[in-house]
Structure formats: C-alpha cells, structure tokens
Amino acid sequence: MNYHWNWGIFWQISPDGAHTYFQLLLLGTWWTLTTAFFAWIIALTLGSLVGVARTTPNKWLLRFGNAYVELFRNIPLLVQMFLWYFVLPEVVPNSVGVWLKQLPDASFYTAVVALGLYTSARVAEQVRAGINSLARGQRAAGLALGLTLPQTYRYVLLPMAYRIMLPPLTSEFINAIKNSSVALTIGLMELTARAREVQEFSFQVFEAFTVATIIYIIINITVTEGMRRLERAVAIPGYLAARAKPSWRQRWKARQRWRLRRV
Amino acid sequence: MFSNFDFDVIIRSLPYLFIDGMTFTVTLTAMAATLGLIWGTLLALMRLSGFPPLVIFATGYVNLMRSVPLVLMIFWFYFLVPYIGQWITGSSAPIRVGAFMSSLITFALFEAAFFSEIMRAGIQSIARGQMAAAQALGMNYRTTMSYIILPQAFRNMVPVLLTQTIILFQDTSLVYVLSITDFLGAASKIAQRDGRLVEMYLFAAAVYFIISLAASTAVRRLNRRIAIIR
C-alpha cells in the first residue's frame, strides 16, 4: 500500500484558522450528541403517546397510531430529511416559508425534527410491544380495582412496560445517534461530516475515518453501560433482575471471588 | 399551496427515474441482500462455533458494524476498496472500482452484521436435540448444518430477513452521499436541474412509501400464514 499515514495531522491547524483537525472532530461529536439528544426527547414523548394509543381499546386512536407508524417507518430517513428541509418551506404560506429559510442553524432544527419523528415511530412500536408483553390480567385487574383507564396506564401498565422496554429503547437511542449522521446531507456539521471535512482539507482519509469510528464506538459503549446501570437502578427486585445479563465487571468480580475460594 | 404543482415534470422524468434510478436501487438491494445473507450466515456459524478466534472475530465484526453509522461506512469503503483491490491484485496503484461495486461491497458487508444476528437467533431457535440426533445418525458438522439446522433456521427467520431487506431497500437511498444515480439520486438530479424540489421529493417519498408498505404488508401476511402452519 502506498498510502502515507500521518497521525500528526490532528494537531495541525485546519484551514478555518481557529481549530486543529482534532478539535473539528470534537465539534462534530458535540453536534452529533446534541442533535440525537433533542431528537430523542421528541421521539420518546411522541413515541410513548402513539405507542399507548395503539394499545387502547379506542378504534380511532388505534388507527391513527398505526397510520403514524407506517408513515414514518416506510419512507427512508434521508427522504424525510429532504421533505422537512427542502419541501416544507415551499408548501407553507409564503411568510412562514421565508422565515423557515432564514432561520439560523436551520439544518440543526430540521435534523432534530426529522430524526425525532422518524425515531418516534420506532419507539412507538417498542412501547406497544412492551405494553402488549404484559399479562392481559394486569389491565383487567387495574380496571377491576376501580382505576380509570388512564390511571391503569399510569400506575399499573407503564411502570412495568418501561422497565421491560429499556434494552430495546437503548438500541433505539444508539440508532438515533448513528442516524444523526444522515443530516450531513442537509448541511449539519456533525461527526461524519467533520470527518469528511478533515479528509477533504488534509487528504488523510483513513486517519480521519479511524478517529471518527473510534469516537462512535466510545459513544456506543458509554450509552450501553449507562443504560445498563439505569436498568439495574430501576429494576424491581425479583422481577426483572434475574433476566438482566451481568456486566463484564460483575462477571470478572464473580470470577475473582471464585478464584479466591479455591485458594 | 399546490397551485403551481407541476405534474408534468414527474411524467417527463419517469423513464429516467425508473429505468436508471430504480433499477440501480433494486439491483443493489437484491445483490447486497444475497451476499449479506451468505456472509451473515457464515458469521453466525463462526459466532456459534465455540472456537475462540472465530468467535472473537465474528463478535468484533458484528459489534463494529453495529456501532458505526452507515453513512460513515459508505465513505470508509468508498476510499478503502481501491486500496484493498490493489493489495489483492498486487497492482502498483489503487485500482478503480465503479460506484456500483463500491456500494455493493459496503452494503453486503454492513448488512451481513444484521443478517448474522438474525441467523444466530434462527439457529438457536432449533431444538438442541436435533443437532444431537443428527450427530447420532453419523452426520458430521457440515452435513448437519446444511441439511438439518440451516434450512429450518432460514425458514423460521424468513419474515425477519425480509423485513431487514425492506430496511436495506430504504437504506440504499444513502448512496446519495456518493452522488450515485439511484432512485433518490435520479429524483434529486432532476429536482435540481428543473428547480422542482417539491414535486420530485414528494414523488420520491410516495414511491418509497408505497413499495415499502406493500412489501411489509406482504411480509406480515406471510408471517401469519407461517404461524398457523407451525
């Protein structure tokens, strides 16, 4: 291979004159996380509402929920981003369209909304599955005790369902972080876009992509470990704890104890 | 709002959109799904083999692919494949691979990680007794896998594999970042040439929506039919 590796590139000042190449990647990481975080708030709120709507006995709520999920799930995220970014300002009344186009950081807001709605459909699917995985008697028992339907959801079904849903919701959150990279097509300078920029300015393709890949892996591990802790913290003793897989740290400690016993 | 909506631009560009664009998208989806399924099944077998180097390799591969965004992977392979080609063929300069080859390799390798997780679940869904029974009959590992375990695992997982393929179909739109003329690429080129962003992007969204919805409805129906048989 006649590729010239130059890892020192990251400490050089980039053509923008203010940041080193490494700082550009860190800036990108910041925007990736910010976008994913705000999109996740939208996704969790709307996804929970729609997911709950799909488990209620009301036929119209059910239909609305199904239509919502199908709409956002069957159009590629990239196309959805284009619709929000290029099409929406053209089809709303003129004054609103002009305001939308002149918005500073328009690509950030668009990315948050598009990613949030896209992810919300997937969250809704998980919420529905979580609630449906509960024994049917739970709902009946709640209603029989005289709780109203909203109260049954609030005090009986949802507290249990959210605990069951934590692992799939974790992977949806990680998906949201990864999917925020699609926003580079509408000009959001997140991590992948910054890696591209480093590559274009410095021609050090593989260094830029390697570091970006490592940052994504670190984010992934951090989120997974954080959610695992959350899972343990909120677990109800005896109900879900047995199902949770022990972390590598716990397994290592167990092995140490086992070794000590043998000595 | 839709007073100056120009349907004509859609009609005029239909041949370009479907003959150039959709053909690329569908070919890429089908070939990447096939190659990804083969490589993914091999990865699943490696992961279940119990032989540490293979287990570590397959686990590492799957985890790497699953923690990195597809867009970054597309860029990675776009730049990496010429060098790998040079290394394999031993030529003096990085070899040129077309846009199609580059994206096919990317999607096959990327989707393999997801197919491998599905196939792993499929293989594990087969009762352990079947493996033991086959071995008691004198079959070796290869025969057991190819005649007993994999056909059943594959059959059990057909709905999930098809759902993953629908996701792949939508994901192929991301080759847009390499300015390739897939369906969305074609729509976007006409949109920019004629200044008809609204019409072309709405039309593209509608086409993706109809195809994906029809496919996922068919999968759901298939799923129900299989469930009754079992």
Image: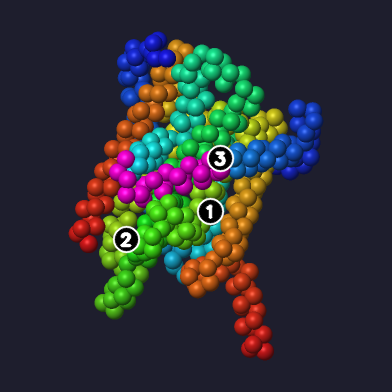
Q: How many other residues sit within 10 Å of disc 1, few (<14), some (14-19) or many (≥20)?
A: some
Dot 2 crowding, Cα within 10 Å, few <14, some 14–19, many 20+? many
Q: Please, what is the three-letter code of the amino acid marked with disc 2?
A: Ala
- A176 falls in the magenta region: no
Q: As rendered, which of A256 and A214 lies closer to the eye?
A: A256
Q: Quadrant of residue B27?
A: top left
Cα–Cα gap, marks 1 and 3:
14 Å
**In this rendering, the label closer to the viewer, 2 or 1:** 1
Label 1 amino acid?
Thr
* Mark 3, other Cα within 10 Å: few <14 / some 14–19 / many ≥20: many
* Overall secondary structure of the magenta section: helix
Q: Judging from the image, what secondary structure is the residue with disc 3 in?
A: helix
Protein chain holding label 3: A
Q: Closer to the camera, A32 or A104? A: A104
The region drawn magenta spans: A39-60
> What amino acid type is highlighted by mark number 3?
Ala
Mark 1–mark 3 CB contact (< 8 Å): no
Compared with residue A47, is residue A230 higher up or lower down, i.e. above or below? below
Q: Which residue is mark 2?
A: B153
Residue receiving disc 3: A39
Q: Residue furthest bottom?
A: A263
Q: Position of residue B160 (x, y in %)?
A: 35, 52
Q: Let me know if residue B195 appears in the view.
A: yes
The residue under the point 67% across, 85% down is A260
Q: Chain of mark 2?
A: B
Task: Determine which residue is flagged by label 1.
Answer: A170
User: How are the colours assigned in the image?
Assistant: rainbow
Is there a contact, CB below 8 Å, between mark 2 and mark 1? no
Q: Which residue does the image show at 34% across and 12% down from the upper left?
A: B8
